[in-house]
Image: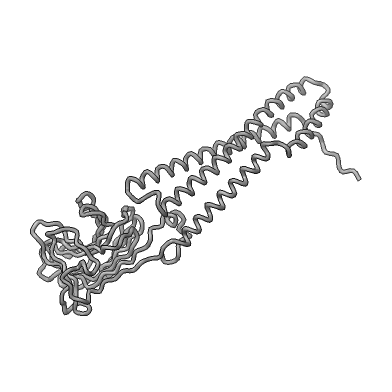
Amino acid sequence: MAGPDHAPVSVRDALARARRELGSAARTARVSSTFAWVLLGLVAVRGTVGVWVGDEPLATPVGIVLTVGIAVAFVAALVGDRHRRRRDRLVHAVAMLEVADLVAEHDDAEGAIRAKIAPKSDESASTAAADPDARTGMATRAIASGLVLTCGALLLFFVASAPTSRLVRWRFLDVASDTSSLGLTTTRAGGGTWAVEHHPEATGARALVNRVGEPGAGPAILLARETSARDLRAATRCKVSADAAAEAACGLVFGYRDEANYGLARLDVARRKLVIATVRGGIERELAGAEADVVKGVWHELVAEVHGGDVRASCDGRFVVEARGAASPIGKAGVWVPAATEAFFDELALDMHPTNEVLDIVPILAPRGR
């Protein structure tokens, strides 16, 4: 039984369809190429900025981010090139159809023209399967699929193999005149002498103390020697002596690079204030602050949580202050006291989270609680 007859396609209909396909191919080629160049530019900027700030852009995890970006840009470039070739073919086809349309307008025997065009259309359709460009398109899709699967596998492997958090704690239960034996190191002379001494009001009757330093000296900072992180949770109990000077304060440092560059969360007892600050080039700048019920001679719990550019500090679980967009580099963490103040620390806990920039970009992949 013969199938239904198919109405012949007029030259004008074929021309309209070819023009639509030409517009679609041109837009796709333009968008794909633009996306590829923009992505390559972002990858280049990210790598350059990484070199400037010193976070080893060619090492894990930043290297994987750059690799994935380059691979995706390459796929976009392949797609754009494929559609550019298709656009060029369509430009030629549109030109031929426009000529045929002009002829058809001046030819009274339009049916004869349709009869001549139909076999050519059938011939074109029969040869499409043998078109090298069609095979190229299939190869492009296969390469693109392979690259996407490879990038996805690398991403999942990196996330699965990322190191877990590391918790380090000091309870200061043993007397020690040399804090280096505890894995702690001082950063400068003159800020005051650090030691673990007998203190009846501390846990286990021992506390870390910093005595008053030299007049005009910079703050005393004691760092955890073998630790370095960008994202962390630091906690301590500290107090300043009842007869402390007007500069009475105690705090936590994080992202420490050197004496002139670090982040700080402190209890400003003199002003009864909880403060988040940053020190850059030796100049301190207060980022956020809030009133807090802190007094001399009383233990206060201080917690600082750092993730990326966000810092959150709390005092005694009640007073909270936050600073967003405060860039924190990878660095050491520890405790901080002004040179003119005698202060005590009952405990120090550093819960350090591995810096994972892939999880920063795709946070849904991060484990719960991060």
Choose top left, top right, bottom left or bottom right for residue 199. Answer: bottom left
Q: Residue at x 80, y 21 (%)?
A: 107
Residue at the far left in the pictured view:
215
Residue at the far top in the pictured view:
106
Is residue 289 in sight in this rendering?
no
Task: Indicate the position of residue 227 as horizontal and vertical percent values.
Answer: 30, 62
- Compared with 76, 303 (above or below) is below
Residue at the far front in the pictured view:
181
- The N terminus is located in which quarter? top right
Between residue 66 and residue 232, name the one nearer to us. 66
Task: Indicate the position of residue 356 as horizontal and vertical percent values.
Answer: 41, 57
Choose top left, top right, bottom left or bottom right for residue 233. Answer: bottom left
Task: Indicate the position of residue 351 as horizontal and vertical percent values.
Answer: 33, 66
Residue 127 horizontal side relative to residue 160, left or right: right
Task: Indicate the position of residue 104 as horizontal and vertical percent values.
Answer: 77, 23
What colouring does the structure picture have?
Answer: one colour
Q: Residue at x 54, y 40 (%)?
A: 77
Between residue 340 and residue 61, name the one nearer to us. 61
- Compared with 281, 22 (above or below) is above
- The C terminus is located in which quarter? bottom left
Q: Residue at x 49, y 55 (%)?
A: 155
